[in-house]
Amino acid sequence: MFHKINTIKINIPIGIFFITFGKDFKLPMSKAEKTRQFIIEKSAPIFNMKGYAGTSLADLVEATGLTKGAIYGNFENKDEVATAVYKYHVYVLNKRIANFLRERESMTEKLKGLADYYRVNWKSVFEHGGCPIQNASVEADDNAAFLKRHVQHSISGWTKGIAGLIEEGQKKGEFRKNISPEEYAYTIIMLLEGGMMLGKIMNNHKLLYSALDRIDAIIETEMKK
Amino acid sequence: MFHKINTIKINIPIGIFFITFGKDFKLPMSKAEKTRQFIIEKSAPIFNMKGYAGTSLADLVEATGLTKGAIYGNFENKDEVATAVYKYHVYVLNKRIANFLRERESMTEKLKGLADYYRVNWKSVFEHGGCPIQNASVEADDNAAFLKRHVQHSISGWTKGIAGLIEEGQKKGEFRKNISPEEYAYTIIMLLEGGMMLGKIMNNHKLLYSALDRIDAIIETEMKK
Amino acid sequence: MFHKINTIKINIPIGIFFITFGKDFKLPMSKAEKTRQFIIEKSAPIFNMKGYAGTSLADLVEATGLTKGAIYGNFENKDEVATAVYKYHVYVLNKRIANFLRERESMTEKLKGLADYYRVNWKSVFEHGGCPIQNASVEADDNAAFLKRHVQHSISGWTKGIAGLIEEGQKKGEFRKNISPEEYAYTIIMLLEGGMMLGKIMNNHKLLYSALDRIDAIIETEMKK
Amino acid sequence: MFHKINTIKINIPIGIFFITFGKDFKLPMSKAEKTRQFIIEKSAPIFNMKGYAGTSLADLVEATGLTKGAIYGNFENKDEVATAVYKYHVYVLNKRIANFLRERESMTEKLKGLADYYRVNWKSVFEHGGCPIQNASVEADDNAAFLKRHVQHSISGWTKGIAGLIEEGQKKGEFRKNISPEEYAYTIIMLLEGGMMLGKIMNNHKLLYSALDRIDAIIETEMKK
DNA sequence: CATGAATGAGTTTTCATTCAT
DNA sequence: TATGAATGAAAACTCATTCAT
């Protein structure tokens, strides 16, 4: 569980990603923190499926079984719930991917593992409303402006994580030295998100797979030595 | 202007895209049709920026200067306005791209022109809320279900348009015969949408450009003979 | 058809009832009169089933196939339509009962025929919303005040019709001289309306029949010599 | 006051009527229950005078001094308010009649007391919109269908109450054994409702009295031994 | 700290009515 | 006279938020 995010920030590299939340350093959670976390976890799928504007406090009351008062006791307003939920989504995604990649050793394997993660988990992702970063990205841009900087931050983080992997691979001699790690990181993310979008709306995971295959091909033909 | 879309459907190939709206066959518009069209055009940017759930009838009243009654006199409900607006967005986008590509002769040029269109127009697209297909795609999937089939239809149409171009290029000997037109069409769309998403949320059109450049590279290295 | 009700009033005794509309003296109807009459006839069942407050102009538009403008061209407002419809209901009811009683010769037969009319026609009456006088009576009293005097007038008319029958029977020696025709008229109406109300709401026409049987019994035991 | 009607049902014979609400067993009311009851009591005369379709939420806001939100916090929708109000009307009517009859000992006296109740209270009943069962009966049948089963239920209840009285009288030797209690119960109700309807719309309580007198006469000549 | 109850401004939609054509 | 199109007020209902307890 993540908590105390406003008071204590600990950056621990887990696998490839720098996770901004404690892991082995969990402080015992106060009741308030537990409720806060409970609200976040129950609200997360709702926000991801209905969007920020489409989710009402009544939805959150239903999802949590708590009262509006309880929600407002733990969050200043709906924006703050949405923000916490968004951060939670990113945290969970990062952690899951980190776990998924942990046992892969070479950077090539780790990078390809990113695509594998979605090959394995596409169904669950589709069913829970798709990629939270994509959803937030599209809605935040004009309508839920308070989310924008968080989305930017998490995309930056993701980019840095992937670029770090590539750099590591360059150091280890797996990848060519003359490629831009950041540029390839962005390319991978674009394909991932583009594939996710098409696959989900068209009810056809093969479209996502096609994007993932292209990522593999890029690694194989453009990045590997 | 487009009108009579329900009664008279004329498929005219404009450039690469088959546009489903009259062109030289415009009937004189009734007052209702004019008002309907007026509402659609004034509402279009609002819906694209605020999303379906984020746009209220009061927003439409403000944008159009008409009364709620007038809007409900011309549309059955908010869904129907949103649907008409979405179709309008797709129509306009198709028409603009068709115009943009008109003078390009080879299929290679036309295909690359698609990327060029966004190189030229990214700013205006960003300012008006981004790609309407992307926006609708993300929101329609779970929250605005009534839009989903329209989004699917327009993505299919777009795919067919691009695939048709590639086939034509294959016939003309510009492109390799052993590639799948549809698969490459989807790849191009994914890169476009992925690049659009990243470029917009990060306030950095160079990220979009990077996707567009990769489209060019794919044409050059994988498609051309 | 009835028409010109505002300009020419002809009281003709048809059977027992004095009908306030022309019968053999129909003037040729103007187009406006025809439309007016058409609106009344099509609206009549709607008002009887949904009530005055529950019937909207949209309902009338749907029922008539005409436009709101057409309705407002022929009636000053919804009240006036409702009033005309109410009068029409009363007229039709009176006429039907008059027809039903025409061939009965003795006043006893005519009086019992009133009950018979409902024994025969209860189903159709139930299906079209029940007794229009009862409906209007209940609604007019507080909510549709403009109707009240018309309801009073028609109940008076109905009372006078029945009382007239009884008087005639007294003159002919069928009925006792010492009973009050008006009082018995009211009693018959009360039983009719009470039976109608119970029968309809309980979905049980036998309750209505029970009221009708009591009317017969009263005639037999209290009125007949 | 009545409350907890859904959780605890206590049937106590009060006079002739079995009342389905606690009497000496009142639990302390929660604030919500108090507000709910407050809304019901303030809304009751409005609904009885204006009818279901004719009563708007704004009317209820005005009558209660509460906000729409407060009303919707205590009732799911307008239907539910109307239903609760109808039940309240029936409850109050039953209780008042039960009180009125309490000290009468013989069943004959109780039965005649029913007519007496209206002889005494006709004015107040007229002023508050008439008989709520009649009003609901007429409107529920076609327009406010959700009320129909409640009206049927309360008419059944009323019938059973009166029939029970008659049976008791039969047992006690007051009434003839060969009459159908239920049939006479219905006859009494019909006369009551028919008289109420005529008396109210004609602004003439003597018409109601005439129905009440006939009830007395029926008891005297047909029921009593 | 959480609840229950309320607020008031907001939502979408429908109303009776009007009026230029 | 009838239509098509609009109005503006009102309809039912929901929203995010507050606060006494």
Image (spheres, coloured by chain):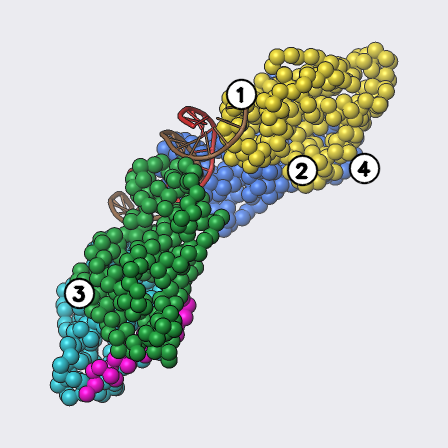
Chain colours: A cyan, B green, C yellow, D blue, E red, F brown
Q: What residue type is labelled 1?
A: Phe
Q: Which amino acid does label 2 sit on?
A: Glu
Residue C56 x/y as whole percent: 51, 33
Q: Find out whether the residues at labels 2 and 3 contact each other: C-beta distance under 8 Å.
A: no
Near mark 2 (Cα within 10 A), the count class, few <14, some 14-19 or many ≥20, is few
Q: Find out whether the residues at labels 2 and 4 contact each other: C-beta distance under 8 Å.
A: no
Q: Is residue C203 left or right of residue D144?
A: right
Dot 2 and dot 4 within a common chain: no
Q: In this orientation, does residue A43 appear?
A: no
The label on residue A218 is none
Residue C183 x/y as whole percent: 72, 17
Q: Mark 1 points at which residue?
A: C146
Give the CA separation, mark 2 to mark 1.
Answer: 26 Å
Write down the region rendered in magenta: A201-225
Residue shown at 28% from the left, 67% from the top: B109
Which of the two marks, 4 or 1, is nearer to us in this view? 1
Residue A161 x/y as whole percent: 18, 75
Q: Is residue C45 left or right of residue C54?
A: right
Q: Mark 4 points at which residue?
A: D178
Residue shown at 73% from the left, 35% from the top: C122
Q: What residue type is labelled 4?
A: Asn
Q: Is residue C99 above or below residue B21?
A: above
Q: Is the magenta stretch mostly helix, strand or loop?
A: helix
Residue C6 colored magenta? no
Q: Which chain carries label 2?
A: C
Q: Mark 3 points at which residue?
A: B206
Give the CA separation, mark 2 to mark 4.
Answer: 35 Å
The label on residue C127 is 2
SS class, disc 1: helix
Give the CA separation, mark 3 to mark 1.
Answer: 73 Å
* Quadrant, the N terminus of chain A: bottom left
